[in-house]
Image: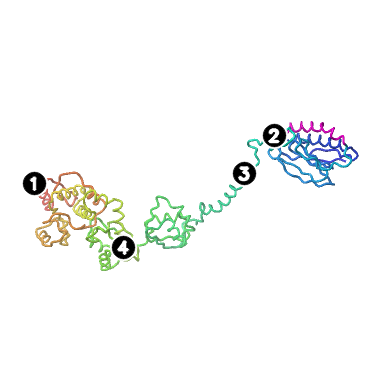
Amino acid sequence: MTSVIGAFELPAEDPDEPVERRSRRSRSRDVDLDDEEVGSGRRGRRSRGRDDEEDEGGSRRCSRSRSREADLDDEEVGSGRRGRRSRGRDDEEDEGGARRRSRSRGRDADPDDDEEAPAPRRARSRARGDDDAEGTGERRGGSRRAPRRRAGRRRPAKWLVVTAAVVILGGGVGGAVVLRPYLFPPDYDGEGTGEVEVVIEAGDTGADVGAALQEAGVVASVRAFTNAITDEAGITPGTYRLRSQMSADAAVELLSDPASRVGVQVTIREGLRSSSILEEISANTEIPLEELEAAYNDTEALGLPEYATAGPEGYLFPDTYMFEPNAEAVDILKQMVDRYKQMAEELDLEARAQETGYTPNEIMAMAAIIQAESGGVEDMPKISRVIYNRLEIDMELGMDSTCFYAIGEYGIALNNAQLQACRDSGSEYATYYRSGLPIGPIVSPGADAINAALDPAEGEWLFFVATDPENGITEFAETEAEFLELVDKFQQSQQN
């Protein structure tokens, strides 16, 4: 009868054979098997028999015995020691001096066994030497010590790496569940259908807009919308006409198109007085003029800057607006004041005004004159210089535009009757017969005029005349004689 272990065929043991010979033959077979498997970390073969023998090479084996039960206690072999505990009467350990001897070797044990022990010890010592060469870490002495671990083969480190890999993989899978809606959020396809109106409020963030669109059924998710927003997308507050179940990209594109805005578009030109602005708004929005005038006088509701001491005149910023269909008068005017504040911040008006030595309101008064008197943007810094030069020598400004405002009329040049009316009005907006600036702006200046008031051109001019108003030509003079020549030139242009 034979027993098969792995790929080896071993002869069956003869029960009549002496114990000593069987023990030696078992050890010999174990050494042979161990030589083939040392370094690979494979477990030793279990051999059937009554005696449990352990291999000293680091891959000990315990003979299986149907009559006895053996417990295996892992010890490291090379990178991981393996050991076998064998409970029973024949628990035999290595003769190296550290292993325990079997508690009971039988009453009939041969006393000469101790004398024949050296031969097996030499065989096992050679086996241990081979094992040491293969990295088992066993000493050749009589006692064991903790095996030396080679760099890169430390078993705990392997388990740490494996554990880390599991954590990373686990995090990756869990992360995929969390990140998928972020990187690939739900989104519709196409341009959508039907018609949906969505209101975007001033100060709304991209997430706020996305939430409003998702609630209205325009986009599938907030994240899809915010992912689609680009730097080029010019989305402004207002009411928009969109479609249901649009892709996020299509929604952003439609919101960036002014044609999608719902409401009334009104353009307010530079240089208009507040009275003209209110009339234009009323004509385009069908809001009664009386309501607009009442809102205009509610200065606290408009949120005017603190330095606008003379009222809203000049602070309804000229621009193109989209007014909501259901907007009230005060909302419209406040929107224009807010636009002025935004522009003033962009120009850093207050800080730059302080550098000139004038208040922001005085700068706005200058800017209004510059806007009303100039024929083009290129003339604005020069007109600004004329104002600065006259103020420095305490010369009256003598601006026709301010007198026309004071008497409530319009024109290019004052005639004698209008000049007398301006003198008689006693208005603080009149610049004839008094020095200094008017108490506030007379029209709503644009950004170019405001910037010119903050940064006048260099020059000695004290006079200017619109010699060809029809073509926007203005000329400048330093002396009164030069000024009179320019006046004649203007009169000739008017006669022609």
Residue type for callout 3: Leu
Q: Earlier in the sequence, mark 2 or mark 3?
A: 2
Residue at numbered disc 4: 332
Q: Earlier in the sequence, mark 1 or mark 4?
A: 4
Numbered tag placed on residue 160 in the rendering: 3
| Nearer to us: label 3 or label 1 | 3
Residue type for callout 4: Ile
Measured Cα–Cα span from mark 2 to mark 4: 88 Å
Whether 489 is drawn above or below 144: the answer is below
The picture quadrant where one finds residue 99 is top right
Across and down, in percent, residue 380 comes to 21, 49
Q: Is residue 82 left or right of residue 428?
A: right
The part of the chain drawn in magenta is: 111-131
Magenta stretch mostly in which secondary structure? helix
Q: Earlier in the sequence, mark 4 or mark 3?
A: 3
Residue at numbered disc 2: 135
Estimate how packed mark 3 is, as few (under 14), some (14 to 19) or many (20 or more) residues with alpha carbons within 10 Å.
few
Q: Residue 247 or 223: which is nearer the viewer?
A: 223
Residue at numbered disc 1: 481
Q: Earlier in the sequence, mark 2 or mark 1?
A: 2
Measured Cα–Cα span from mark 3 to mark 1: 97 Å
| Nearer to us: label 2 or label 4 | 2
Measured Cα–Cα span from mark 1 to mark 4: 49 Å
Q: Residue 431 or 378: which is nearer the viewer?
A: 431
